[in-house]
Image (tube, rainbow, N blue to C red):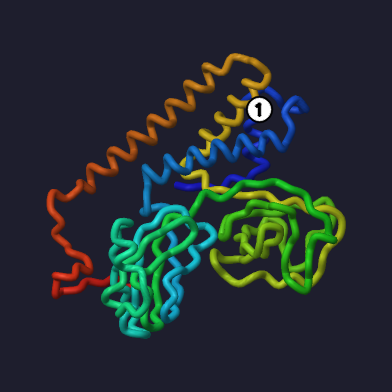
């Protein structure tokens, strides 16, 4: 069973773990960096253990005639497949095969029929080759990137009623990541204390909020007053956030030049348990010796598709 854990809780637990409650030896900025380090490590291990069964998102876009390159979602991490709707409005996305880099020069060009398209993920772009000759809907299935966790205070002047946004320079937040708010004054009108929100990424310095993942921005009708605090939230996934807490506590005690062997041993044990989970998961899903399903092969007259 999963549970939500906010950034302030992670910070408080890390300080308790390192016996540094009410200590200014480690700044909040340092602690936030170390918590993000631990979260990134944990996220990669969870992706290995749970994979697309737990971390999964999809989004759609439209091709443009003779245009090969398309932006990936801002929270893209790992590709799980691309689908192309060959019959407009059907909702049936035919899987598209990847092209190999050695074939790029031969394939890249304009005027490719939809049935001929292949794709490649390169840097922050989705590339179709050859470039599509017509307009069609495509679907990207992917594992999202780990949310950047943050804990910052903003003033009412940082809230825009006209744009429904909050400004925080270089916030680092990822689209669709979860958050909560607290306030020492009055929270912006339209937002509710204790309510879970999802980040709507606008740009490097601004973001909006939604009540649903990938939903529309909440209408902010007043800037509020005083200072409010943004708190990132993660899914603890059966208590695995302990890995993050121990990682941060280890860094804190390292800075203090204290013994970290006990904490390191506990974190190592958790890492071993996650690795074991991944192995057991694979036992139920063994790799095929032969490919019994030929997806979108040129020499296969029976083209398969998936509905989403």
Q: Quadrant of the C terminus?
A: bottom left
- In the image, 88 versus 47, the foreground residue is 88
- In the image, 240 versus 294, the foreground residue is 294
Q: Residue at x 83, y 51 (%)?
A: 184
Residue 223 falls left or right of residue 70: right
Residue 133, percent from left and from top:
36, 81
Q: Is residue 288 above or below residue 210?
A: above
Based on the displayed image, in which of its 4 quarters is residue 205 positioned? bottom right
Residue 202, percent from left and from top:
65, 65
Q: How many marks?
A: 1
Q: Is residue 129 above or below residue 204?
A: below
- In the image, 68 versus 227, the foreground residue is 68
Q: Residue at x 34, y 74 (%)?
A: 84
Which residue is at the far right?
Answer: 226
Residue 145, percent from left and from top:
50, 52
Residue 42 falls left or right of residue 304: right
Residue 241 falls left or right of residue 110: right
Based on the displayed image, in which of its 4 quarters is residue 21 positioned? top right
- In the image, 187 versus 138, the foreground residue is 138
Q: Residues within 10 Å of mark 1 (few under 14, many from 20)?
A: some
Q: Which residue is mark 1?
A: 16
Which residue is at the far front?
Answer: 105
Q: Residue at x 47, y 55 (%)?
A: 123
Based on the displayed image, in which of its 4 quarters is residue 24 positioned? top right
Residue 134, percent from left and from top:
38, 83
Q: Is residue 32 above or below residue 233?
A: above
Label 1 secondary element: helix
Residue 76 falls left or right of residue 289: right
Q: Is residue 96 above or below residue 264?
A: below
Q: Residue at x 67, y 65 (%)?
A: 208
């Amino acid at each position: 069973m999963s549970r939500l854990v906010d950034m302030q809780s992670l910070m408080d637990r890390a300080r308790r773990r390192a016996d540094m409650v009410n200590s200014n030896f480690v700044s909040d900025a340092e602690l936030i960096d170390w918590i993000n380090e631990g979260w990134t490590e944990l996220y990669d291990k969870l992706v290995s253990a749970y994979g697309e069964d737990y971390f999964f998102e999809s989004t759609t876009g439209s091709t443009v005639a003779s245009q090969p390159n398309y932006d990936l979602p801002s929270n893209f991490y790992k590709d799980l497949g691309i689908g192309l709707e060959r019959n407009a409005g059907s909702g049936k996305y035919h899987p598209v095969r990847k092209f190999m880099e050695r074939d790029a020069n031969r394939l890249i060009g304009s005027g490719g029929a939809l049935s001929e398209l292949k794709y490649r993920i390169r840097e922050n772009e989705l590339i179709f080759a050859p470039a599509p000759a017509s307009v069609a809907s495509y679907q990207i299935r992917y594992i999202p990137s780990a949310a950047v966790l943050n804990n910052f205070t903003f003033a009412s002047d940082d809230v825009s009623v006209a744009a429904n946004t909050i400004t925080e320079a270089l916030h680092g937040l990822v689209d669709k990541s979860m958050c909560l708010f607290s306030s020492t004054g009055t929270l912006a009108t339209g937002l509710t204390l204790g309510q879970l929100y999802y980040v709507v990424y606008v740009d490097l310095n601004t973001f909006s909020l939604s009540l649903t993942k990938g939903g529309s921005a909440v209408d902010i009708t007043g800037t509020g007053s005083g200072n409010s605090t943004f708190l990132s939230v993660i899914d603890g996934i059966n208590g695995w956030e302990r890995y993050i807490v121990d990682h941060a506590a280890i860094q804190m005690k390292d800075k203090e030049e204290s013994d970290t062997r006990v904490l390191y041993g506990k974190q190592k044990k958790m890492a071993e348990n996650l690795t074991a989970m991944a192995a057991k998961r694979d036992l139920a899903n063994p790799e095929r010796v032969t490919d019994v399903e030929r997806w979108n092969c040129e020499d296969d007259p029976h083209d398969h598709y998936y509905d989403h």
